[in-house]
Image (cartoon, rainbow, N blue to C red):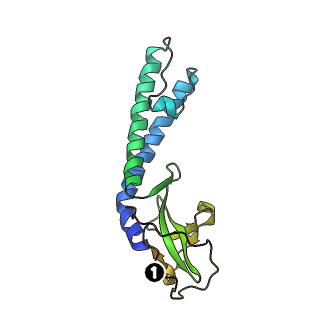
Amino acid sequence: HFSLEEARALIPQVQPRLRLALRFHAALRPVVLAINEAGYDVDWEMLSGEVEFDDEARPVDLRNLAKARALYEGLRAEIDVIEALGCEVKGVVDGLIDFRSWMQTTSGYAEVLLCWRLGESELTHYHETGVGFAGRRTIGAQDEAKFVAERPESSVLPAVVNEPPRHSPRAPSRARSK
């Protein structure tokens, strides 16, 4: 989990990686299309090397498959770096990244996702865990301190916001994602 400040501090690291992942994805699409047009169904198992072409594959198809696998490997590597930071890649094409956080509400703490989209200058939105991008809400200046990396153990919490709880509080995590 991240505080708002911690999540915002990661955007300069996440942004170039996500841009590169998007470029790998854009380069991969026409190669996959060419393989599909040659009569092969390309899926993640084929791109990851778990499935091979049959013995009658043409040399051009074998080259395209090698190129597609290299591009897929690059795409996966960039996503893996982003996820190793503790972020959740929700969509490469849409440029969506989520950061798990705890948000203080009037009745305790609720787990939420701080939500950033490629092209946004900074992280300014969040949404509930089960809602997704369509349920994004703007983080107001008065709300910035409500987002914390660790949920306090204390059941007595200072009142900061006057809104109904979104989720029941969950057990605090022992390990901190980063």
Residue ID at (42%, 48%): 79
Inspect this view and state whether residue 124 appears. no
Whether residue 111 sits left or right of residue 49 in the image: it is right
> What is the quadrant of the N terminus in the image?
bottom left
> What is the quadrant of the C terminus in the image?
bottom left
Which is nearer the eye, 27 or 124? 124
Residue ID at (39%, 57%): 14
Q: Position of residue 120 (x, y in %)?
A: 47, 64
Indicate whether 63 appears above or below 170: above
Q: Which residue is mark 1?
A: 145
Whether residue 87 sits left or right of residue 128 in the image: it is left
Q: Amino acid at mark 1?
A: Ala
Q: Position of residue 89 (x, y in %)?
A: 48, 53
Indicate whether 38 appears above or below 94: above
Looking at the rendered structure, the secondary structure element under dot 1 is helix
Please rate how many residues cluster around mark 1, counting C-alpha atoms within 10 Å: few if below 14, some from 14 to 19, many from 20. some
Indicate whether 11 appears above or below 155: above
Whether residue 41 sits left or right of residue 175 in the image: it is right
Q: Picture quarter containing residue 16?
A: bottom left
Residue ID at (52%, 26%): 34
Indicate whether 28 appears above or below 36: below
Q: Position of residue 48 (x, y in %)?
A: 45, 32
Total number of numbered discs in the rendering:
1
Residue ID at (45%, 25%): 65
Inspect this view and state whether residue 4 appears. yes
Which is nearer the eye, 178 or 25? 178
